[in-house]
Image (cartoon, grey):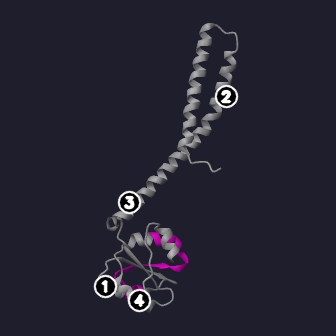
Amino acid sequence: MREAAAIAYPGATVTDVVPEGAQKLPPCAAAIVDGTSDTGAATEVARRIRAGGSRAALLFIVAGRDAGLAARVAPLGVLEQVELHDVARTLGPAIERAMGGEGAWPAALVAARDELRKTQRLMAAGEIALGLQHSMNNPLTAILAEAQLLEMEDLPEETKSAVARIVENTRRLVTLVRTLDAIGPKKQG
């Protein structure tokens, strides 16, 4: 379960709290209570967390949905039950729902989420740039090769000047396209 919480929220601090220490829960945005083996003990942990004054969102990890358990822990503010077999997929969204949406999130969590989104956008831009580079490289190489062959021909001065401009501008485009490689994902090697 510790691993699932770390995957759902990489910046989160995950600690184990025994039932006797639940009243001394450090300040946190959410507390995940393991109710897979003993729902009675898990309910007691939730009671102690609330008795200690914590306003953290409470989630229960359960072996399977239990309407009776939901009714017993709802007064304690436990709004979410996450089934153990599906914890990796559903824990993150359950924490978000239990915390009441982004408005209740701690600033550090909002900042981490925003940084992740920014990184994802930059990666997408890099992949687009890399795709553009590959799509443009072959036609530019062909144009440059043909123009360089034309430069070797005996052509009128006006045509030679036009071909020279084609070669010069194509080289500039090739250089520009190569700079797109710096934007894209780094090659492993």
Residues under labels 1 and 2: Cα distance? Answer: 73 Å
Percent of width and height locating residue 35: 47, 86
**70 to the left or right of 155:** left
For label 1, the SS is loop
Is 55 in the magenta?
A: no
* SS type, badge 3: helix
Q: Is residue 188 above or below residue 182?
A: below
Q: Which residues are magenta?
A: 69-92
CA gap, disc 3 to disc 2?
47 Å
Q: Which residue is mark 1?
A: 52
Residue tagged 4: 19
Number of residues whose C-alpha sits closer than 10 Å to that of mark 3, classed few (under 14), some (14–19) or many (20 or more): few
State whether residue 26 is above or below residue 132: below
Q: Examine the image and state in which quarter residue 99 appears.
A: bottom left
Task: Name the secondary structure under disc 4.
Answer: helix
Q: Which residue is mark 2?
A: 142
Give yes or no for contact between labels 1 and 2 (Cβ–Cβ under 8 Å): no
Circle 4/circle 3 CB separation < 8 Å: no
Kind of residue indicated by mark 2:
Ala
Q: Please identify the quarter of the rendering in which residue 141 is found.
A: top right
Of the two numbered discs 2 and 4 in the rendering, the one whose residue sits closer to the viewer: 4
Disc nearer the start of the sequence (1/4)? 4
At a point 57% along the width and 39% down the height, the residue shown is 132
Q: CA distance from mark 2 to mark 4?
A: 72 Å
**Residue name at image x 45 percent, y 57 percent:** 116
Residue 127: x, y in percent?
Answer: 55, 47
Checking the image for residue 111, the label placed there is 3
Disc 1: CA contacts within 10 A as few (<14), some (14-19) or many (>=20): some
What kind of residue is marked 1? Gly
